[in-house]
Amino acid sequence: MSQAKPNPFENALEQLRIAAGYLKLDEGIHQMLAHPKREVTVSLPVKMDDGKIKVFTGFRVQHNDARGPFKGGIRYHPNVSLDEVRALSSWMTWKTSVVNIPFGGGKGGIICDPKSMSPGELERMTRRFAFAIAPIIGPYKDVPAPDVYTNAQTMAWIMDVYNMINGVMSPAVITGKPIALGGSLGRDRATGRGAVFVTVEAAKVKKLDLKKATFAVQGFGNAGSNYAEILQEHGPKLMGASDSSGAIMSKTGMDAGKLVAYKEKTGSVSGFPGSQPISNAELLQMDVDILSPAALENQILPDIAKGVKAKIVAECANGPTTPEADKILAKNGVFVCPDILANAGGVVVSYLEWVQNLERIAWSEDEVNSMLEKKMIGAFKDVHDASVKYNVDMRTGAMITAVGRVAEAVKGLGLFP
C-alpha cells in the first residue's frame, strides 16, 4: 500500500517548530516566521499555437525579507500547488540564512506541463507571468531565479519584461541569466558543486575515504548530473542514477560524464549501456556510501528511510525527506546533509551574480568557485557546530542556525506600525 505524499508546507512548519523549541523562540516571532509575508496568485491567459486561449495559474510567495530582498526560483510543473510554493519559499528563507547571505526567501511557480509546450508557448506564458508579478519584484524587492523546468532563457524573458515596463536596464532583477545578459560564470553548475563541497566535509566527519566510496543520484537533471560529474573527480564511483523516465544501476559503476552525454542524446538515462533498470525505491535503498536525492520533494518517506543503506545523504533537491523519515535516518546513523545546506550553492552564486550586476563588475569562474567553496565550507561548519552543541541531527542544526539568524533580524526590526 503506497503512502500518501505529505503536505510540503506542513513539513516546513514542523521543521520550524522543532528549531523554535531548541531556540526557545518567542511565540510571536515563531508565528511571524510561520506565515509568509505575501502570497500572490495570478491568472495567465496565453494564446497557444493552435490559436486557442488557455489560462494558466501562477504563484509568487514572498516568505520573509528581514535579512534582505526575497530570493527564490520559479518552477514550471503540472504538480505545482500553493502549499508547495509556500514550503519552498520558507525553505529559501532558511537557505539564504544558513549560508549567511543578505537575502530573504521567496518562490514562484506555474501549473503547466512544460514538456508538452512549444518554445513560443513557453515564452508567451513566461512573459505574461513576468508582467503579472512585475510590481512586486525588483533588485531590492524580490530577485527570482530558475528552478524545475526553467532556465537561463526563461530568466532572460522575465528580465526583458521587467526592464520594458520600468524603462531601465536592470540585470540585478533576476539571477541565473545568460552570461551575455549579466549572468555569472559558474552559476549553471553551482548547485551541484556546492553539494559536493558539503559532501566532502561530511566525508571527513564520517571518516569516509572518498577514493573508495560509491554513490547514487536520484534525479539526473541539472543539479544531480553536475553533482555526479564533480563528485566523481574526488574518487567516488557512480553506481545508480534516475530521471523522470526511470532508474538504472551498474554493478561495476558508470562514468558520470558518459551518462550525461547519453542523456543529452536520448533524453533519458534509461538504457545506458552496461546498466540494468531498477525501481525508484531500489535506487534510494542501494548499497552505496553516498546517496543524493536530487529530484522533487517527498521522495524519502518512512518506508524508504528504513532501507536506506547510505552513510551520507546529500540533499540536492528541496524537501526530499519527510520529518518522520528524518527520525528514522537519524536513528539509523545516516548523516544527512539537509537541503537548506547541501543545495545552497545555487543561491550563493545567485547572490554573487546579483552583486556583480549591482556593482557592474564580472568575476572569473575560478573566483566565483573559490567564493562558493568558502561560503559552503563555512556554512557546513556552522551547522555541524550547532548539531554538536545541541546534540541534534544536521537538519535540526541547520534549522537552529538559520531560524536563529532570521529571528534576530525580525526582532531587531520590530513591528510597523
Image (cartoon, grey):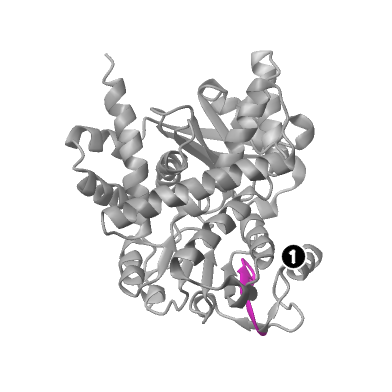
Q: Residue at x 51, y 59 (%)?
A: 201
Q: Main secondary structure of the magenta part?
A: strand
Residue 229 percent location from the top left of the image: 69, 63
Position above or below: 316 against 259: above
Query: Residue, x 35% and y 67% (percent of image)?
Result: 325
Specify the segment rendered in magenta. 240-251
Quarter of the rendering occupied by the N terminus: bottom left
Q: Position of residue 134 (x, y in %)?
A: 57, 24
Q: Can the viewer see residue 295 in this picture? A: no
Residue at the spot x=53%, y=75% of the render?
A: 280
Instruction: State left or right for residue 259 relative to residue 338.
Output: right
Was residue 248 drawn as part of the magenta stretch in this picture?
yes
Residue 70 sits above or below residue 19 on the image? above
- Image quarter of the C terminus: top left
**Which residue is under mark 1?**
260
**Residue 401 within the magenta-colored segment of the rendering:** no
Horizontal side of 125 relative to 330 (left or right) equals: right
Question: Label 1 neighbourhood size at 10 Å, few (<14), some (14-19), many (20+)?
Answer: many
Secondary structure beneath label 1: helix
Query: Residue 394 appears at what percent x and percent y?
Result: 37, 58
Q: Is residue 102 above or below residue 56?
A: above
Quarter holding residue 388:
bottom left
The amino acid marked with disc number 1 is Val
- 285 above or below 187? below
